[in-house]
Amino acid sequence: MSQLERTFNQPLGGNEMPRFGGPATMMRLPAMETAAGLDACFVGVPMDIGTSNRPGTRFGPRAIRAESCLLRPYNMATRAAPFDSMMVADIGDIAINPFNLPENIRIIENAITGILGEDCVPLTLGGDHTITWPILRAMAQRHGPVGLVHVDAHADINDEMFGEKIAHGTPFRRAVEDGLLDTSRVAQIGLRGTGYMAEDFDWPVNQGFRIVPAEECWYRSLVPLMQEVAAQFGDGPVYVSFDIDALDPSCAPGTGTPEIGGLMLSQALEIIRGCRGLNIVGADLVEVSPAYDPSGNTALIAANLLFELLCVLPKVEYRQ
Ligand code: MN
Ligand code: MN
């Protein structure tokens, strides 16, 4: 066993236990009760009572963990070696109340506050997108208003859905109302689809958000976009929220509100890798609904994108 392996948790290797065996933690990392002593953690929020169309994201964390079994510790494209310099573990799921959405806002905010209190960066496995509002409440309490890279087919800035203020289409409206976002440092990437009103995307623009519709991404590398985002965002704290429906449903069908004409996988990788150098204080990957994902591909993509998010955290070392 090398010094590195003694110092930092490592994913269980495929030559120690077959990849289809062993505990089904994220990346086959050790399971921990709390975030104490960790630099970063994976944490699940198995919730779908904020969804408006197809349900099922309560099963998202479990499916993502299952499909993460093939992930190896090194990023061959970027040479990121996250387990060389960070203590990482899977701290399990937040015990949400499956019958009470407002109560879950408190439960999730408290749980994330506890993680941040350990100086640990949470990487959250959703769950529907409602969960990002309470996460941002915890983030802003610790760091002040944060910048936001929000990758999604939808802006999620509705004032209400079916008369309700708390839903998966409203988290960023609530976040603005609560003063949780540095609205001069918000980018929403991948927006598209049909709207309730033709002006739906005007509200985020009027808040100062940069919106990047999917059409502006088609046929293009997003490396230049992310260079602009990095220059705009500077050194301040940044949260990354990745809704899997940002991707085209041809590659990621397992989600509740799919929209055609979405991002390609290579563009998702460019967006996340383009976040390297930002002061990322947390991230989530939401809206994976396994019932609509018969191949498991959507959860496989989600697991890989969560690894890519781990690879751009500020404490990560890169091999020469
Ligand atoms: Mn969303
Ligand atoms: Mn969405």
Image (cartoon, rainbow, N blue to C red):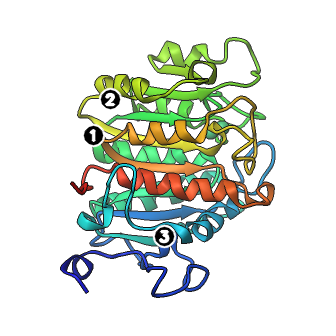
Residue at mark 1: 277
Residue at mark 2: 230
Q: Is residue 105 above or below residue 189?
A: below
Q: Nearer the viewer, residue 132 or 194?
A: 194
Tell me the kind of residue under disc 3.
Met
**Cβ–Cβ below 8 Å for labels 1 and 2?**
yes
Can residue 134 be seen here? yes
Q: Position of residue 11 (x, y in %)?
A: 41, 75
Q: Quadrant of the N terminus?
A: bottom left
**Circle 3 SS class:** helix
Residue at mark 3: 27
- The reply, left or right, for residue 279 in relation to residue 128 is left
Tell me the kind of residue under disc 2.
Ala
- The reply, left or right, for residue 48 in relation to residue 226 is right
Mark 1 Cα-neighbour bin, 10 Å: few <14, some 14–19, many ≥20: some
- Mark 1 → mark 2, Cα distance in angstroms: 8 Å
Q: Nearer the viewer, residue 221 or 56?
A: 221
Looking at marks 1 and 2 on the same chain, the residue that comes earlier in the sequence is marked by 2
Total numbered badges shown on the rendered structure: 3
Q: Residue at point 22% right, 78% down?
A: 7
- Mark 2 → mark 3, Cα distance in angstroms: 28 Å
- Mark 1 → mark 3, Cα distance in angstroms: 24 Å
Looking at marks 2 and 3 on the same chain, the residue that comes earlier in the sequence is marked by 3
Looking at marks 1 and 3 on the same chain, the residue that comes earlier in the sequence is marked by 3
Q: Position of residue 146 (x, y in %)?
A: 35, 36
Tell me the kind of residue under disc 1.
Gly
